[in-house]
Amino acid sequence: MTINIAIVGAGPAGLYAADALLKVLPESQIDVFEKYPPPYGLIRYGVAPDHYKTRNTSRQFARTLEDNNVGYFGNVDIGSDITFAELKENYNAIILAVGAYNDRELGIPGEKLPGVYGACAFVGWYNGHPEFRDLNPKLDQPGVAVIGIGNVALDVCRVLAKTRNEHSNSDISEYALQSIEKAPLEELHMFGRRGPIEAGFTPKELGETRDLERCHALVDSGQLPETVEGEFEGREKGIKEKNLNILKELANRAVEKKPISMNFSFYSSPKEILGVDRVEGIRLEKTEVIDGRAVPTGEEFEVPCGTVVTAIGYHTAPISGVTLDGGIIKNSGGRVDRGIYVVGWAKRGPSGTIPTNGPDSRDVVDLIASELESTNKAGREAINALLEKRNIRRINFEDWQLISEQEFAQAITPRPRERFTRVEDMLAVLEKSA
Ligand code: NAP
């Protein structure tokens, strides 16, 4: 009897799970569902476009999707095209690998003003995500404030700071690059409510702010401690020390006159986004860090800006019939309910790099194998029949490869690839080749 397993979400966590299933349950038939035609989730739509090498990790996942036991169901939305109940009816186990696709909110006045964007939307915009490609963010003022001091905040600032020349090995969408080129950017502010030691940056990403063509990174040496204090050990301590050394280097070097400055502002907690019809500035409160927590000092200051990007983390979007718990799917070691499991950011929250998902997904697959009920389920055949009846155009992996090849063929040189950003354009490639 075939074991049928559905994975909802074709990002790294879901595809690591598919790969583990092929090894642990080689007799299983695995179907991977994704709302839009392209697979790879965060690799395609989250990783910064100028980190093109990281995007190439998708090649390892392509091998999984090419396996005979794996079926790719791109352009199939679980919830509207196929209901969650229908999945339960037709599969022995379901793995939710839906990521964390909603921006967390700051919860301060002014957050709904035009000109405020969550990182999910903003990053999705420059990465050509169909849902955000029409975001058309306001980039018409010299100042941009980015809230948060993690790698996503760095990504946003760096992508805005880079010139077309520096994006030559990037697959940023052309419309976004044109919009950034036109923007009269002068001041990129990155605000952290805690200090440089607590920042979520990693040294490689921080180091990339050193030598940007048109942007000088500015750090106030007065905000930097002499050494890394606190209960950090091993690898974490090493990262903190490297970060501190880079920040010291940025603080102590001569200021180069460049059109844009990237200001690292620590100990600054946002209080209000200012403006009447749109963002005009941001009011922040100085903090001090006591026992690792940001404690307000009562001292406030304002900074003019026309755009605010919040890079403060994500939470998982609700799925009907599944309980959320503080931004993730409620689970115990990956188990959500009988026959239902969760992996990746939807399981443990938005942290870690792409490879972090490997061991995590493998553990959940081991759990599935130990609990699997071998009732007869119809799996793929039933789903294909439902899709046909509903006139939903499923994108299989071969279809996706055709679309992907066309993205390379239509590259705007010297950039390697120009993505399709509308589903209808992706489907048109298939119609043409039929
Ligand atoms: P992150 O490192 O957790 O950074 C989130 C930032 O938002 C923190 O500085 C946090 O401050 C701040 N924040 C949260 N709530 C806030 C609030 N209410 N007010 C002000 N600030 C607030 O997460 P991320 O940058 O979103 O990245 C997510 C994960 O993806 C991380 O593990 C990251 O390393 C990874 N990533 C990796 C790469 C790469 O390897 N190149 C690139 C992008 C992302 P507190 O610390 O004070 O809470």
Image (spheres, rainbow, N blue to C red):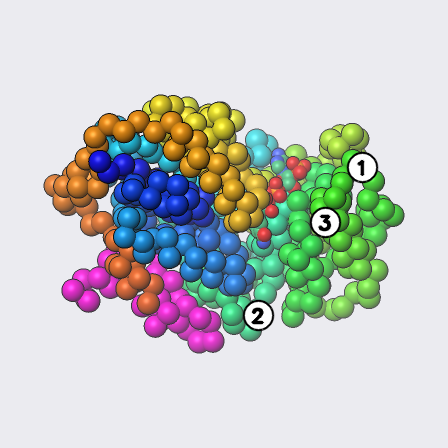
Q: Earlier in the sequence, mark 3 or mark 1?
A: 1
Q: Distance between the residues labelled 2 and 3?
A: 26 Å
The first of marks 1 and 2 along the sequence is: 2
Helix, strand or loop at label 1? It is loop
Which residue is under mark 3?
239
Residue 396 appears anywhere in the view = yes
Residue position marked by numbered label 2 in the rendering: 166
Disc 3, ligand 1: is the CB inside 8 Å?
A: no
Identify the magenta region.
Answer: 406-434
Residue 12, how many percent across, how many down?
A: 45, 48
What is the three-letter code of the residue carrying label 2? Answer: Glu
Q: How crowded is mark 3: few (under 14 residues within 10 Å), some or many (20 or more)?
A: some
For the residue carrying disc 2, how many other residues have a C-alpha within 10 Å: few (<14), some (14-19), or many (20+)? some
Residue 292: say if magenta.
no
Which residue is label 1 attached to?
Answer: 230
Mark 1 neighbour class, 10 Å CA radius: few under 14, some 14 to 19, many 20 or more: few
Q: Please, what is the three-letter code of the amino acid marked with disc 1?
A: Gly
Q: What element carries label 3?
A: helix
Foreground label between 2 and 3: 3
Asked if residue 413 is among those painted magenta in the image, a careful observer would answer yes
- Could you give the CA–CA distance between mark 3 and mark 1, rounded to whole angstroms? 13 Å
Quarter of the image that includes the N terminus: top left
